[in-house]
Amino acid sequence: MTSNRRTFAIISHPDAGKTTLTEKLLLQGGAIHLAGQVKARGAARRARSDWMKIEQQRGISVTSSVMTFERDGITFNLLDTPGHEDFSEDTYRTLTAVDSAIMVIDAAKGIEPQTRKLFEVCRLRSVPIITFVNKVDREGRSPFDTLDEVADALALDVCPMAWPVGLGGEFQGVLDFATGEIARPEGDSREFLGKRDKEPLPANIADEVELAQGGYPSFDLEAYRNGDLTPVYFGSALKNFGVAELINAIATFAPPPRPQPSSAGTIDPSNKEVTGFIFKVQANMDPMHRDRIAFMRLVSGTFKRGMKLTPSGSGKPVAIHSPILFFAQDREIADTAEPGDIIGIPNHGTLRVGDTLSETNKVRFTGLPNFAPEILRRVALKDPTKTKQLRKALDDLSEEGVIQVFYPEIGSAWIVGVVGQLQLEVLISRLEAEYKVEAGLEAAPFDTARWVKGLDAALKNFADFNMSNLAKDRDGDPVFLARSAWDVSYQQEKNPDLVFSATKER
């Protein structure tokens, strides 16, 4: 039985148009009835997926939300990934939960650093990619330059599936190679309102199309699904060009739910046992209720509401009474879920990122890491009576993966670690908005952190000499806070029996 689920993410550099594309896919899929053009100051547009306060202020996606929509009998689960470079950790973990991705490239700018970084994450997991070259209705580079850049920079075969009829001021529509029809701009806003025709192409465009169809490999489903070839669509998310074609491409070519790696070998979606893993935890999604939702990617089996599943973290079975399916900001209770679906499980801190949930508690999914933080700061409370609230908030937020928190063995100032600067702003903003805790951040004398593993005797010996540089993370595991990279290599040399690790499996 082939699955009708398609679970995918959109990856791009900030400003390439990911939020607009997300919105238009939801609109075409019938999940929202009016694209999120809420007119705010300066007509600032916000997609429904960007719901957190700091996101609305800065117009970036900070949390990876999930949006589900159905079209022509296929259920699409779209995972929104933070495009901002500072959120690589959360984004990385979201990409472990998808089966394919759409890579959005700005027609004028080509491949930008963040796109490349996210692409590398997809490559690690052989996630197949469909490329969407956005904003072809504006002045941009030649489509050939963009195709060649994708082929060279990402070492992928490229297969154009559409072609812009002119760019920028000369833009006259987009030709779909499969049907031979040209989608035409209409009205003052020059957007696509449904008009297609098969009029002859201008001579220069006809030459381009002949070159494009002859000069690049033809589409090969197997090569695409192995992550070796990317079909390339051209369009404009803002003006609706290419959006329907993308939905069709995901429906037709993108793989159904894929088997997932586990400690006991890969787990196939057709496996009868219900299994899944938590790739994200989000606290306070609803400001009226201090809720906490764990996002689970269902890997195998048919989940039914009220089922008991055992999280690998605690080993105690949990009955899941009110699992949630997400429709942008709307939620509904899920009675059943199939492999590939993402369900939200409300809980009070029992479920954590990296947990495997299963009926027998024998499976452990692998590959959800924590990364060593690149920025460390001390947290300074403005009101010392709020120590307890601060500890709760830091534990919550580290569980979500927004920050990592370290409790030093000596000294009372707790230390937070992040991969990027923007996470610190999110931390301060959320402490105040959600936990009513006012805090500042001060420089910490440390540059990076490493998890330390080894035999008890070697660890004790190391601790005796380095107590002032030792801390425990949220799980109580020992962490060495290093003043510099030199410090790390020096300690590694001095303590050959210990492992100093820059990542930790969650």
Image (cartoon, helix red, strand yellow):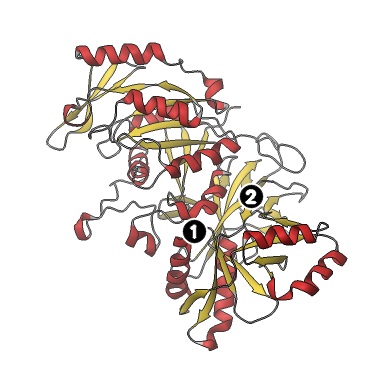
Residue that appears at 66% across and 58% down: 319
Say whether disc 1 or disc 2 marks the residue closer to the N-terminus: 2
Q: Position of residue 480 (x, y in %)?
A: 69, 66
- Tell me how far mark 1 sits from mark 2, CA to CA: 19 Å
Q: Quadrant of residue 213?
A: top left
> What percent of the width, then of the height, locates residue 362?
78, 48
Q: Is residue 84 above or below residue 447?
A: above
Q: Nearer the viewer, residue 4 or 445?
A: 445
Q: Residue at x 35, y 42 (%)?
A: 16
- The secondary structure type at the circle numbered 2 is loop
Q: Residue flagged by tag 1: what amino acid is it?
A: Gly
Q: Which residue is mark 2?
A: 368
Q: Using the rendered view, name the quadrant where residue 263 is placed.
A: top right
Where in the figure is residue 471, as x and y percent of width and height?
A: 69, 71
Please identify the residue farthest to the right as the structure is shown: 457
Amino acid type indicated by mark 2 = Leu
Q: Nearer the viewer, residue 70 or 436?
A: 436
Give the quadrant of the N terminus: top right
User: In this rendering, which labeled residue sits more in front, label 1 or label 2?
Assistant: 1
- Give the residue displayed 36% in from the left and 35% down from the top: 110
Q: Disc 1 designates what residue?
A: 420
